[in-house]
Image (cartoon, rainbow, N blue to C red):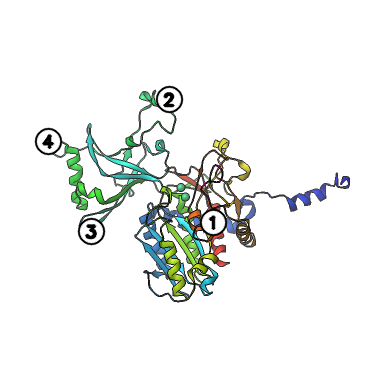
Amino acid sequence: MIDNINNENTETKLSDKLFYKKKSAYELLNRAEIEEAYSYAKGYTQFLDEAKTERESVIAAIKMAEAAGFVPYTLGMPLEQGGRYYYNNRGRGLYVFTTGRRPVEEGIRILAAHIDSPRIDLKQVPVYEDSGMCFFKTHYYGGIRKYQWMALPLALHGVVVKADGTSVNIVVGENEGEPVFCINDLLPHLAQDQNTKPLGTAIAGETLNLLVGACPYGIEGEERIKLNLLKILNEKYGIAEADFMSAELCAVPAAKARDVGFDRALIGAYGHDDRVCAYPALTAVLKNANSEYPLMCVLADKEETGSNGNTGMKCRIFSDLIDEISRSLGGNPNIVRANSKCLSADVAAAYDPNFSDVYEKRNSAILSCGVAMSKYTGSRGKSGTSDASAEYVAYIRGIFEGEGVVFQTAELGKVDLGGGGTVAMYIANENIEIVDVGVPVLSMHAPFEVVSKVDLYAAYRAFAAFCRR
Ligand code: MN
Ligand code: MN
């Protein structure tokens, strides 16, 4: 062994061969590829601005799918080999799929992302007046850090469905000249007591009330600001207070997606989690619709609240669709599931040097080092994760390495410090191979999340490679 000491040349070559070294996309890609990544990001920011809620995401995705020749599918409809379809699940979930040309029993290539994001929902009886102001009572949706949503311009998005079944779409606060809404914050001068409380409990959920008006209707009577507000809503949308009972309205940041940094390398926006994976997953399927394998892009709702409900990933519609596709193409659905392969396309936490103590750097996703593959998620002793097999991770790794996809591995943070999950385990429970692959995000779940353009592009390249193999 002593022979090798001082043989620097050999040692350098040996370390190149044996060490795993994470590299930035900027080291690995050529100039044309980086330009391609930046131009791909433009389509994505457009999608972000169009699609701030799951409903808007479904509409935007259908528009893209139809432009690529996909047609609506209804349960029971016979499929044609080589066909392109989408199934709209109640306007909040979407399944875009192709039949491919190979026997369906060889399995479907599935990309599963979610299109709901944390936000502030309205309660069913939201309107009240107090001290010269009118507010909406809210109930937050998903895992938010409450302080981030105060003193911030918010837009209102959603739908009000009246008892007769007619519905009104509402979007206010996105266009120049439209009013916005906000949640009041406490002035520092009087925050002495609040400042001593832990961040997680300093702001009560019931104080996240949305400021929506201050001008009274007439001068006589009670609740005249509320009356004026309801009059405006009635004139504009034909709704009355009781109609909020059957509504889905939510407050989201009013800002549009923006480039971040002098070099424009990053995108800052609301709702990267998980549109930053939904968009590349969808575009990968649309661009590779001629792939010989049957493909499916799942855009699920309700991931941020646990994937329950008939638009969430746990809904049997996912499995029903596989049954329908299999039968229509002459395959046994159980064999189709067993041979199907999936990527759970959801975001990873990007390592942030400003909060270095919560990450274990060697196993964290580093910004601009490509799309992140997480063999497992969950918390504590890998609780709440499907933990992909070494064989399947090797299969995916082989595709990425073979196609020059810039990728890295990632865990959410230090062991025992917290945790999180994705839709992966629900799909794994259907007897389908799956691993998490997604874009690293800074300030995850904040009203303004940040991603790197080269990581977004790496996700697109990863998903496209998966569709082709
Ligand atoms: Mn997510
Ligand atoms: Mn999330």
Q: Position of residue 71 (x, y in %)?
A: 39, 70
Of marks 1 and 2, the one in the foreground: 2
What type is the residue that disc 2 sits on?
Thr
Which residue bears the numbered disc 2? 196
The image quadrant of residue 139 is top left
Find residue 354 and report its image quarter. top right
> Which label lies toward us, 3 or 1?
3
* Mark-to-mark CA distance, 3 and 4: 32 Å
Answer few, some or many: residues within 10 Å of disc 4's Cα (few below 14, many 20 plus, some between 14 and 19): few
- Label 1 residue SS: helix
Q: Earlier in the sequence, mark 4 or mark 1?
A: 4
Q: Which mark is residue 217?
A: none
| Quadrant, the C terminus | bottom right
- Kind of residue indicated by mark 1: Ala
Q: Quadrant of residue 133?
A: top left
Question: Where residue 72 sits in the image (x, y, percent)?
Answer: 37, 69
Q: Tag 2: Cα neighbours inside 10 Å, few (<14), some, or many (≥20)? A: few
Specify which label sits upstream in the sequence, 2 or 4: 2
Magenta region, residue range: 380-387
Q: Is 410 on the left or on the right of 280, as rendered? A: right
Of the two numbered discs 3 and 4 in the rendering, the one whose residue sits closer to the viewer = 3
**Alpha carbon separation for disc pair 4 and 1:** 59 Å
Determine which residue is flagged by label 3: 166
184 above or below 245? above
Regarding mark 3 in the picture, which secondary structure is present there? loop
* Residue that numbered label 4 is attached to: 221
Structural crowding at the residue carrying mark 1, measured as other residues with C-alpha within 10 Å and reported as few (<14), some (14–19) or many (≥20): many
Cα–Cα gap, marks 3 and 1: 40 Å
